[in-house]
Amino acid sequence: MACLTMKPIVDGIEQDYTGTIRVVRLDARNAENRELARQIGVQMTPTYVLFDAQANEVFRSSGSLSRSQFDELVTKFTK
């Protein structure tokens, strides 16, 4: 399952970028979260959605991303 494979990478991103970005995890399998997942357009997991400081979506991807891809995205969208 890609979500479980990505967990250590996301954990590292969350730790390394504390104060720069906020990581919010949503377990779409949880019945309480399904409506929110539907509202933000999660169709498969893992899905990564990046929002800018004004809550505008600036990036979306489904499936696995490498740590270097995450680092590039953070650099690109936090300048």
Image (cartoon, helix red, strand yellow):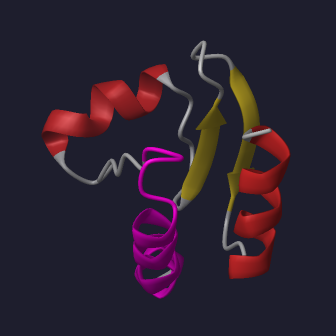
Q: Is residue 74 above or below residue 70?
A: above
Would you say 9 lies left or right of 7 here?
right
User: Residue 6: x and y, percent?
Assistant: 51, 79
Instruction: Specify the farthest residue to the top.
Output: 54
User: Residue 3: x and y, percent?
Assistant: 46, 73
Task: Tell me what residue is drawn at x 40 percent, y 82 percent.
Answer: 4
Q: Nearer the viewer, residue 20 or 55?
A: 20
User: Residue 8: x and y, percent?
Assistant: 43, 85
Would you say 21 lies left or right of 18 here?
right
Q: Nearer the viewer, residue 65 or 62?
A: 65
Task: Tell me what residue is drawn at x 78 percent, y 78 percent.
Answer: 68
Task: Tell me what residue is drawn at x 19 percent, y 49 percent.
Answer: 30
Task: Tell me what residue is drawn at x 53 percent, y 47 percent.
Answer: 20
Residues drawn in magenta: 2-22
Would you say 40 lies left or right of 63 here?
left
Asked whether 48 falls inside the magenta stretch, the response is no
Magenta-colored segment: predominant secondary structure: helix
Q: Quadrant of residue 77?
A: top right
Q: Is residue 16 above or below residue 31?
A: below
Quadrant of image for the C terminus: top right
User: Residue 25: x and y, percent?
Assistant: 35, 51
